[in-house]
Image: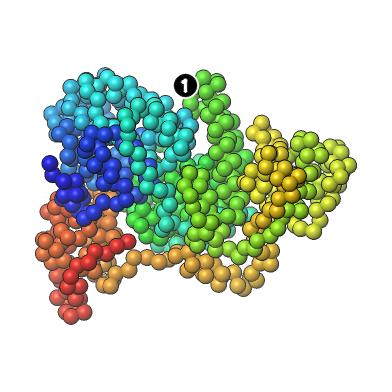
C-alpha cells in the first residue's frame, strides 16, 4: 500500500506530518478507532483526509459547519480530489444531484451534516455504499457536558448501527475536558480508540485581558495597531454587533458584520467578503467562525467576555492559523457576566432534554461561566490558566500574555484575606461581594444599616487599600478556592474547606498585584510599544525578496478571484514566502516547495514560475536564491 507520507506530498504538497497527525493516521489505517484532541490550526483535517484517500471505500465526514464543508471541499477539488458536501445550503435539486453522483462512486470524501444522516434519501445511499471510514468533526457536540451540545449528534450512533458493516471511526475536536472526552468515547461507542492529545498551547498567540471603562475608545486604540490586517471582533449580542459595525464603518474601517438575525444571503455575502479579503474586519456574534479556515487572521478581539473557556479558546484560536504571531484581546466588564448569566437562565437550545437534564446542563454552564470570569480576574499567567483548565501542566510564566508582561509585585495579602473571611463568617454567609466590601470599608449606606452590617465586628476595618484592590483580593480568593459563590440568582459568598487554612491554620497567602503607581501619561505610548515588542506582536514572516513576494501575492489573489475560491486555497502566504526565497524555475524545484502538490502545479505552476523567471532576469545577481534548499521552518 502507498505510504501516507507520499499521499501527503502528492495531494497536499507537504514533506512531513505535524505533531500527532502521523500517529492518528497510522492507527486509522490499521482499522483502529481514534480520538484526536488538537488545537485549532494543528491540522486535524489531514488526519481524516489522508486515510480517506487510502481506504478502498468512501469516507463520510460528519460536521455541523457549512463553512468548513465548503472550504474543505473547494480545497480538495483544487488538489485534484473529488469531494462533495450535503447540507442545508444546497437546493433540493443540487442535493439529489450530489447524491446521484455519490451513488455512482464519483466522490472519495463526502461531508454531511448530522441532521441528514437518518433521512430516507441519505440512508438509501448509505446502506448500499461501501463506507470505509466515518470521521466526526467537532465531536464535543455529542456530549451534554460539552460547551456546544447538539442533540442532532446523537443520531450518529444510530446511523452507524444501521450500516451493513461497521466502519472505522475517527473523532476530532479542538476542545475537550477529561469529562467530555470520557462522554464522547462512551456515547460514540469507540472501540479501543487511539487517543492523541497534542496539547492546547498555541505559542504564536499572545493573550491579554483589559478591563475597559470605555470599550469603544479601547477598541479604536487597538485597531490603530492592526492597520491593514485581517481580524475578528466578537460581540455578545446582535445589537452590539450592529452598534460596533456602524461605529467602525463611519470611522472608515474596512468592515463587515455577521449574526443570526441577518438573512442567509446577507450572512453568506458578508462571510465571503471577509474570506476573500474584500473586508478586513469582521464584527460578529459567536454564530460566526466555526469552520472558517482563513489562515491570516492577525487579531481576535472579544468586545465582551464569552460564556466559557471552551468558546473563548475556540474563537480566539481563529487567529494565527498560519503559525505567525497573532493577538487575542478580551475587553472585560462586569456587565458581561450578567448578560451571560441571563443567556444561561433562558437557555432554549436543548428543549429535547427533560427538566432534570436541562437543569444539569445549566448548572455546568454556570460553573463554566465562573471559570471564564476567573480568567478575567486572575493575575496569574493567562496561558497557564487556560492550559490548566483543559488539564495540562503549564509553567507559571509564558512571557507572551498581558499578565506576564505587566509590572507585578508579590504581596502578602494574608491579613486582608483573614478579615474578609471573618466578615463573611460572622454575617453567616448571607451576602454577596458588594455588601461585604461596603461593610469592610465602613459604608454608611441605607442597605448596610438595614442589614445591620454596621454592627459586624469587621465593619470599617479595611481602610488602607483602595476598593478596587480589595475587590481584586476577593476575586483572588474565589479563583484559588478559598471562597465560592452560589448560583441561585444572587451570588452569595460562602466559605470553603480551604478557608480554614487561612483563618485557623494561619497559612500565608501571597498574591501578584499590579503596582499601584501607574506609568505617567507621557510614558503610556512607550510602555505599549515595549509590551508589543516583548509579546512578539508585529513580527511577520519576511521575504528576502519582498518585491517578488508581492508580485507572487498579486498573481495568487488574481488567480483566486478568477477561480472563485479564497486566496489561501490557491497558495498560502507561507508557500509564497518560500517561493520568493528559493525562486523555483523548474517543475522539480516548484514541487519541492511546501504546499505545492502535483494538482496545484498542473493548474498554477507555470504562471508562478514565469513571474519568478521575469524577476530574476530583471534583477540579475541580486536575485540569487540559495543553492541548496534547506526547509524553512516556522
Question: On the image, which quarter does residue 116 sit in?
Answer: top left
Instruction: Identify whether 30 is placed above or below 41.
Output: above
**Badge 1 element:** loop
* Residue at (56% x, 69% y) in the render: 527
Instruction: Identify whether 229 is placed above or below 389.
Output: below
What x and y, as percent, mark residue 448? Answer: 83, 42
Q: Residue furthest bottom?
A: 621
**Res. 499 in view:** yes
* Residue at (15% x, 58% y) in the render: 591
Colouring: rainbow
Q: Nearer the viewer, residue 140 or 337?
A: 140
Instruction: Identify whether 31 is placed above or below 465.
Output: above
**372 sits to left or right of 36:** right
Circle 1: is it few (<14), some (14-19), or many (20+) Cα within 10 Å? few
What x and y, as percent, mark residue 463? Answer: 81, 56
Q: Quadrant of the N terminus?
A: top left
Question: On the image, which quarter does residue 513 sit in?
Answer: bottom right
Q: Quadrant of the C terminus?
A: bottom left
What x and y, as percent, mark residue 44? Answer: 31, 44
Q: Nearer the viewer, residue 29 or 237?
A: 29
* Residue at (39% x, 26% y) in the render: 187
* Residue at (25% x, 42% y) in the render: 25
**Res. 610 in view:** no
**586 sits to left or right of 313:** left
Q: Residue furthest right?
A: 455
What x and y, as percent, mark residue 283? Answer: 46, 49
Identify the residue position indicated by label 1 in the image.
352
Amino acid at each position: 500500500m502507498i505510504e501516507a507520507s507520499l499521499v501527503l506530498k502528492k495531494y497536499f504538497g507537504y514533506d512531513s506530518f505535524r505533531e500527532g497527525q502521523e500517529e492518528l493516521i497510522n492507527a486509522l489505517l490499521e482499522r483502529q478507532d481514534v480520538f484526536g484532541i488538537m488545537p485549532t490550526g494543528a491540522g486535524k483535517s489531514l488526519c481524516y483526509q489522508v486515510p480517506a484517500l487510502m481506504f478502498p471505500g468512501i469516507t463520510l465526514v460528519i460536521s455541523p459547519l457549512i463553512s468548513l464543508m465548503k472550504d474543505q471541499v473547494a480545497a480538495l477539488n483544487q488538489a485534484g480530489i473529488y469531494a462533495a458536501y450535503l447540507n442545508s445550503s444546497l437546493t433540493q435539486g443540487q442535493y439529489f444531484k450530489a447524491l446521484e453522483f455519490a451513488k455512482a462512486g464519483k466522490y472519495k470524501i463526502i461531508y454531511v451534516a448530522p441532521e441528514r444522516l437518518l433521512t430516507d434519501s441519505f440512508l438509501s445511499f448509505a446502506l448500499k455504499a461501501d463506507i470505509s471510514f466515518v470521521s466526526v468533526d467537532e465531536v464535543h457536540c455529542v456530549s451534554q457536558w460539552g460547551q456546544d451540545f447538539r442533540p442532532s449528534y446523537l443520531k450518529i450512533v444510530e446511523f452507524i448501527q444501521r450500516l451493513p458493516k461497521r466502519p472505522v471511526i475517527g473523532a476530532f475536536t479542538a476542545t475537550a475536558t477529561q469529562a467530555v472526552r470520557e462522554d464522547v468515547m462512551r456515547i460514540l461507542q469507540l472501540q479501543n480508540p487511539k487517543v492523541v492529545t497534542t496539547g492546547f498551547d498555541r505559542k504564536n498567540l499572545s493573550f491579554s485581558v483589559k478591563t475597559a471603562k470605555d470599550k469603544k475608545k479601547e477598541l479604536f486604540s487597538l485597531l490603530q495597531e492592526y492597520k491593514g490586517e485581517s481580524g475578528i471582533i466578537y460581540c455578545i449580542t446582535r445589537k452590539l454587533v450592529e452598534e460596533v459595525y456602524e461605529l467602525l464603518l463611519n470611522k472608515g474601517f474596512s468592515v463587515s458584520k455577521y449574526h443570526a438575525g441577518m438573512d442567509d444571503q446577507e450572512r453568506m455575502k458578508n462571510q465571503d467578503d471577509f474570506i476573500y479579503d474584500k473586508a478586513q474586519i469582521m464584527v460578529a456574534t459567536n454564530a460566526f467562525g466555526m469552520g472558517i479556515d482563513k489562515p491570516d487572521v492577525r487579531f481576535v478581539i472579544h468586545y465582551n467576555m464569552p460564556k466559557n473557556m471552551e468558546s473563548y479558546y475556540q474563537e480566539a484560536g481563529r487567529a494565527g492559523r498560519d503559525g505567525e504571531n497573532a493577538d487575542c484581546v478580551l475587553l472585560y466588564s462586569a456587565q458581561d457576566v450578567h448578560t451571560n448569566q441571563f443567556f444561561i437562565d433562558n437557555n432554549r437550545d436543548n428543549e429535547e432534554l427533560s427538566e432534570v437534564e436541562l437543569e444539569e446542563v445549566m448548572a455546568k454552564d454556570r460553573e463554566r461561566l465562573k471559570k471564564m470570569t476567573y480568567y478575567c480576574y486572575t493575575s496569574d499567567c493567562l496561558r497557564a490558566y487556560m492550559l490548566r483548565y483543559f488539564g495540562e501542566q503549564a509553567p507559571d510564566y509564558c512571557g507572551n500574555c498581558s499578565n506576564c508582561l505587566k509590572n507585578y509585585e508579590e504581596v502578602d495579602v494574608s491579613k486582608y484575606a483573614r478579615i474578609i473571611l471573618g466578615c463573611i463568617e460572622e454575617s453567616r454567609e448571607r451576602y454577596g461581594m458588594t455588601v461585604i466590601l461596603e461593610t469592610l470599608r465602613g459604608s454608611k449606606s441605607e442597605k448596610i444599616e438595614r442589614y445591620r452590617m454596621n454592627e459586624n465586628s469587621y465593619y470599617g476595618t479595611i481602610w488602607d487599600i483602595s476598593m478596587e484592590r480589595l475587590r481584586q483580593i476577593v476575586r483572588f480568593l474565589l479563583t484559588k478556592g478559598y471562597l465560592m459563590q452560589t448560583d441561585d440568582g444572587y451570588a452569595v459568598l460562602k466559605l470553603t474547606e480551604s478557608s480554614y487554612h487561612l483563618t485557623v491554620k494561619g497559612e500565608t497567602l501571597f498574591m501578584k498585584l499590579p503596582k499601584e503607581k501607574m506609568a505617567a501619561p507621557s510614558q503610556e505610548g512607550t510602555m505599549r510599544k515595549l509590551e508589543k515588542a516583548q509579546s512578539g506582536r508585529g513580527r511577520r514572516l519576511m521575504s528576502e525578496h519582498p518585491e517578488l513576494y508581492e508580485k507572487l501575492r498579486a498573481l495568487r489573489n488574481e488567480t483566486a478571484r478568477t477561480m472563485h475560491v479564497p486566496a489561501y486555497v490557491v497558495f498560502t502566504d507561507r508557500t509564497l514566502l518560500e517561493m520568493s526565497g528559493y525562486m523555483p524555475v523548474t517543475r522539480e524545484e516548484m514541487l519541492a516547495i511546501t504546499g505545492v502538490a502535483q494538482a496545484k502545479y498542473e493548474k498554477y505552476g507555470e504562471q508562478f514560475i514565469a513571474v519568478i523567471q521575469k524577476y530574476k532576469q530583471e534583477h540579475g545577481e541580486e536575485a540569487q536564491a540559495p543553492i541548496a534548499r534547506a526547509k524553512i521552518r516556522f
